[in-house]
Every structure is written in C-alpha cells, then in structure tokens.
C-alpha cells in the first residue's frame, strides 16, 4: 500500500467533490459559460470597444458572475482547469474554494476503515478540526493519549487504559467494529465509576460488535451477556465462547440464537462435546444465513453432524476443526470436498488437527479450491497437501512432525508459489528450493543450518510486500546471510522482525544497525524483537535507533548492566515505552 503523506491528504481534500453534484453542476456550468462569454477577447470588427460605459458594465457583470461561481463552486468541488481552458479557448480562472468538508460522515468513516492507521492519521491531520465530524474529533483526541495502531479499524475496548475508557466510548462511531468481552463489562462496572447500562448503551454507537464470553461459572457473566445481546443482538457479527465447564443454564445458547447476523463463530471446550454441539447448533438456525467462518476446538471426540449440514450452505467459507477424533469421518470429508462455499473461488480456509482418519478420507478428493490451509504433519497430511492447487494457496501453516518427512515435505513446499503467509513449526527442510516469494507478507519459522539459511535468504529477498519476519528457535544459526536483504525488506515496508531465539551478539546488532541506516526517514512503523544484548552490542544498536523514526526495540540486558544500559537510553534520548523489572524493555526512536 502506497504511503499517504500529509501533502497527499491535503491534495485529496482539495480535490474532493461533495454535495448534490447533479443539481449544482448545471448552475456552475451556466455561470462559467456566462463568465467566459464576458471574459473572451472581443472580435476584431467589434465596435465601441473603447466605450468607457460598456467597459464598466462588462466589468460589473463579470464581477457578479464570478461571485455566483464562488457561491456554487465550493459545494460542487470543480474548478476551471487546464482542460476547460483548452476547450473554451478562454483564460484560466482560478476559483478560491472554501476549506469546508461536506463529505457525509458515514462515507468518511467508511473510507477511514479501509486504509492503514498511518493514512488515517495523515488524512485527519489535513482536515481542519472545525470541519471534522464529532466522532473524528474524539478519535483525534483518543489518538493523542493511546496508540491506536493495534486498535484500527477494530477497537478492542477493554484493552484501552481505564483512565481513557470514557473518551474511547465517545469515539466508537469512528471504528468499523468493537471487540468487547462480556465478562469485562461486568468487571468494569465494579472497577470504574460507570453503570452496566451506561457501558451497554455506549456500545450502540458502533456499527458492529465482536463479542467474547468465557464461562467462569458465575451469574455475573451471564447477566452481562444477556444484557448486551438483548440490546444489540442485530449488531453482533462475531462471537467467541470459551467453556471450561458445561454451562448451568441455557443463557449462552439463547443469546447465540438471537445473534442472527453472526459471520464468524468460535467455540472452545475441554471435553464436553455435547455442550459445544449445542452452541454450534444455536448459530445454525434457518435465521443464521451469514455464518461464514466456524471454529471448533475440543480435546475429546466430536460429532460433526451439524458441521456437515452447514458445509452444504453456500456461505460456508472457513472451517477450523481441532479434536482428538471425529465421528462420521467419511461424511465430513465429502462435505468439505463438495461444499459449495469452501470450493467456491475466493478466500476459503481449512484447518484440521488431531484426526488422521479424517485426513486420509479427505485426501481422496480434489481440494483445488482451498486457498488457506492449516494442518498437522503426518503422511496423510502430505497427501492432502498434494491434492491442493499450489498456485492458489495463499496461507499455509504446517504443524510439528514434518521433520521426519523433511525431504518429501520440501518437494511439496517448493511448488507453493503464491504464498502470502507461511508458518512452519519444524525447521525448513534441507532440500528447500530457492524459488520466489513475491507475494509473501508474513513468515514464521526456523532454520536449522547455515546452508539452508543462505537458501532462505535468497528466497526471502524476492519478497516485495513482507510485513512480518519471525525466526524462532533457530538453534543459534548465524544471521549473516540476511545482511544483504534486510535493508531491502525494511525499505519495502517491513513492520516486524523477531530474532528472539538467537544469541543476540554484536554481529546481530551491527547487522540491524546497518539495515536501519537505509530506513531512517521511513514513515512506516517497525518493531524489532531481540534477546539479551551486551553493552557493546546495545551501544551499536541504540546509536542507530536514535537516528531513525517510528522504530520500536524490544530488548533485554543483564541485571548487572541495568545502570549502564539506562544511561545509554538517556544519552540517545530514546522514548521509554515499557521497562522490564529484570532489565530491558521497549524503547522507541526519538521521532
């Protein structure tokens, strides 16, 4: 995504066209035509050109028409531009437009929810405060005291500090969705000077609610859940239910049944398959015609009859099933393979964990339409991966166990050329081909030797849109091979890199410091996560950090280095985001 600068935002604002254009354009065109007729050069044979009275009259007429254009122009948002000049053969007329924003609030909020927070901040900064809708004014105030990067466009309400919660409530209309925990609503009533009714009424300011509820075996969560659903059931688009023990009444199921606009549902249970099935059934009534994504996680066996029925609907797009065994394996495998939703073009997802029999049954079918797959590695899982269309899969998450099938898995992995997200629990196989990863956005995995690291660096260097790079548990493999590609990745917009499992040596600090030199003025945020650094390595990295903007460093240091390390932080004027008691913390660049 191209970065929107403040100048871009100002240009966008000046070019915006608002108001009843169809009705106002004729008036503007008529006024401009009359103005052009008056301002156009007179023909050579025109008489009385030097008549003083006629000149005065023409001047007054032109002035009046110009005033009329000024009245119409701001609402219409057009100007007499170069193209107009060429068409009418008249001198250019620069119309001064008032700096008033007439964009309807609903449209404005919709625009803001589909772009990155940095672009939102630039756009809002370019709009005069007096012209902003009230919700945007509150949003600007909230952004001044809370980092909203992790809250845009969906605000996690109870992750906002208590002292800013009331301000956050007034800014809710500016967000596309509100994530709210029903239990936290109850707890906030006791912790803050607000009533439950005040909190629940404020939720109505949002357009969509994402509701989470956990059964802590008490009446309080049930009451809060019931009150929220009673007030705003039509706005609930996502639910997550955690059940540690079977609920004592039907409150949860009744609440779920009322949320007929749910699009995503997740249910987590220890052992009780009956309870989780009852909740799944509650969001699969004939009225629930919007459910696209379903997640079911239980430690025990699971009867998937209700899932089989849901998969036959055209709106089933994503299934995440984790359990020890599945009853009716054959029926479920056939339903997955033939589902009109899962097999339709677009973003379709499948996650299967725990049941090898289900994978064996699934491997008999054509799975070419699946685009996102998460699977635990077994011989049957390899067969499932071979049944996918490797040129269409955009997200692949392979769980532990493929170490013993490394060569076979490496051959399969080499064919996935369209990946945007790749997560591996085991090391990259030694026969991992270099290939390309032009679309890769996020990688999370580990590398087990230097040879594979060089192949990995060559492959990763082809990424054009990488945002997250996490190398975990990589057995202290040197990162030297990444030295030539990290500057490129940072310039292209890398937002997060983690080497927390590596020994944070001076060499790593120098590698990162060199890469940071190439993005000193970069506007995008970058977070770096490292292990414990020595004072020498810390000096190198903090010096580079002080010359950058929008960079945050997570780092640790030894207890006996605390005083010296804190002195380095102060010397380089770094901003302290968070300090760890044991030494270290989160530190941000001065700008």
Image (spheres, rainbow, N blue to C red):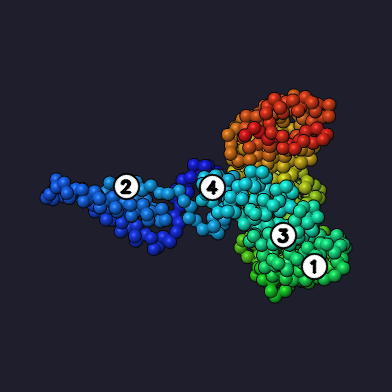
Q: State which quadrant residue 353 falls in.
A: bottom right
Q: Position of residue 186 (x, y in %)?
A: 79, 58
Tell me which residue sits at (72%, 39%) in the image: 498
Which mark, by number, is residue 252?
1
Residue 551 is at least partly visible in this image:
yes
Say whether disc 4 or disc 3 marks the residue closer to the N-terminus.
4
SS under mark 1 = helix
SS under mark 3 = helix
Residue tagged 4: 129
Residue tagged 3: 198
Say whether disc 4 or disc 2 marks the residue closer to the N-terminus.
2
Disc 1: CA contacts within 10 A as few (<14), some (14-19) or many (>=20): many
SS under mark 2 = loop
Say whether disc 1 or disc 2 marks the residue closer to the N-terminus.
2
Give the distance between the C-alpha atoms of the residues marked 1 and 2, in whole angstroms.
66 Å
Residue 116 is at least partly visible in this image:
no
Q: Is residue 395 above or below residue 2?
A: below
Say whether disc 1 or disc 3 marks the residue closer to the N-terminus.
3
Give the distance between the C-alpha atoms of the residues marked 3 and 2, in whole angstroms.
55 Å
Residue tagged 2: 93
Give the distance between the C-alpha atoms of the residues marked 1 and 3, in whole angstroms.
22 Å
Q: Is residue 312 above or below residue 145?
A: below
Give the distance between the C-alpha atoms of the residues marked 4 and 1, in whole angstroms.
44 Å
Tell me which residue sits at (66%, 33%) in the image: 589
């Amino acid at each position: 995504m191209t970065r929107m600068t403040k100048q871009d935002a100002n240009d966008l604002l000046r070019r915006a066209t608002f108001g009843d254009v169809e009705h106002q354009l004729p008036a503007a065109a008529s006024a401009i035509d009359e103005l052009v007729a008056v301002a156009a050069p007179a023909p050579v044979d025109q008489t009385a050109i030097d008549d003083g009275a006629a000149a005065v009259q023409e001047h007054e007429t032109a002035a009046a028409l110009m005033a009329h254009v000024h009245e119409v122009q701001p609402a219409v948002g057009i100007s007499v531009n170069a193209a107009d000049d060429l068409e009418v053969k008249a001198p250019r007329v620069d119309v001064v437009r008032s700096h008033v924003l007439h964009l309807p609030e609903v449209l404005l909020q919709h625009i803001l929810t589909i772009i990155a927070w940095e672009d939102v901040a630039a756009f809002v900064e370019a709009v005069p405060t007096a012209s902003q809708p009230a919700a945007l004014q509150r949003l600007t105030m909230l952004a001044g005291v809370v980092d909203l990067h992790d809250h845009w466009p969906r605000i996690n309400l109870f992750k906002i500090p208590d002292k800013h919660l009331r301000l956050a409530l007034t800014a809710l209309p500016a967000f596309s969705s509100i994530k709210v925990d029903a239990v936290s609503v109850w707890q906030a009533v006791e912790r803050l000077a607000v009533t439950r009714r005040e909190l629940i009424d404020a939720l109505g300011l949002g357009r969509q609610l994402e509701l989470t509820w956990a059964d802590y075996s008490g009446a309080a969560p049930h009451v809060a859940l019931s009150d929220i659903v009673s007030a705003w059931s039509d706005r609930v688009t996502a639910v997550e239910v955690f059940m540690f023990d079977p609920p004592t009444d039907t409150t949860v199921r009744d609440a779920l049944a009322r949320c007929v606009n749910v699009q995503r549902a997740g249910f987590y249970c220890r052992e009780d398959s009956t309870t989780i099935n009852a909740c799944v059934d509650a969001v699969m009534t004939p009225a629930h015609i919007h459910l696209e994504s379903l997640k079911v996680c239980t430690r025990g066996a699971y009867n998937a009859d209700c899932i089989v029925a849901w998969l036959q609907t055209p709106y089933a797009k994503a299934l995440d099933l984790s359990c020890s065994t599945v009853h009716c394996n054959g029926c479920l495998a056939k339903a997955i393979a033939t589902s009109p939703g899962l097999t339709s073009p677009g973003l379709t997802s499948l996650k299967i964990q725990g049941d090898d029999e289900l994978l064996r049954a699934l491997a008999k079918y054509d799975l070419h339409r699946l685009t996102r797959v998460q699977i635990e590695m077994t011989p049957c899982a390899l067969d499932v991966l071979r049944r996918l269309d490797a040129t269409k899969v955009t997200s692949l998450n392979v769980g532990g166990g493929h170490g013993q099938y490394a060569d076979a898995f490496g051959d399969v992995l080499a064919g996935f050329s369209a990946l945007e997200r790749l997560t591996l629990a085991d090391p990259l196989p030694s026969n991992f081909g270099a290939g390309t990863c032009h679309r890769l956005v996020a990688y999370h995995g580990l590398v087990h030797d230097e040879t594979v690291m060089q192949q990995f660096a060559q492959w990763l260097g082809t990424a054009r849109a990488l945002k997250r790079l996490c190398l975990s548990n990589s057995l202290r493999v040197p990162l030297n091979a990444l030295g030539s590609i990290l500057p490129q990745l940072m310039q292209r917009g890398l937002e997060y890199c983690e080497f927390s499992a590596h020994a944070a040596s001076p060499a790593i600090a120098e590698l990162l410091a060199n890469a940071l030199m190439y993005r000193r003025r970069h506007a995008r945020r970058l977070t770096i996560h490292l292990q414990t650094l020595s004072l020498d390595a810390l000096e190198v990295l903090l010096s580079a950090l002080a010359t950058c903007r929008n960079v945050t460093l997570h780092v640790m240091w030894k207890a006996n280095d605390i005083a010296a390390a804190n002195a380095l932080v102060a010397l380089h004027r770094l901003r302290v985001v968070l300090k760890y008691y044991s030494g270290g913390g989160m530190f941000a660049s001065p700008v």
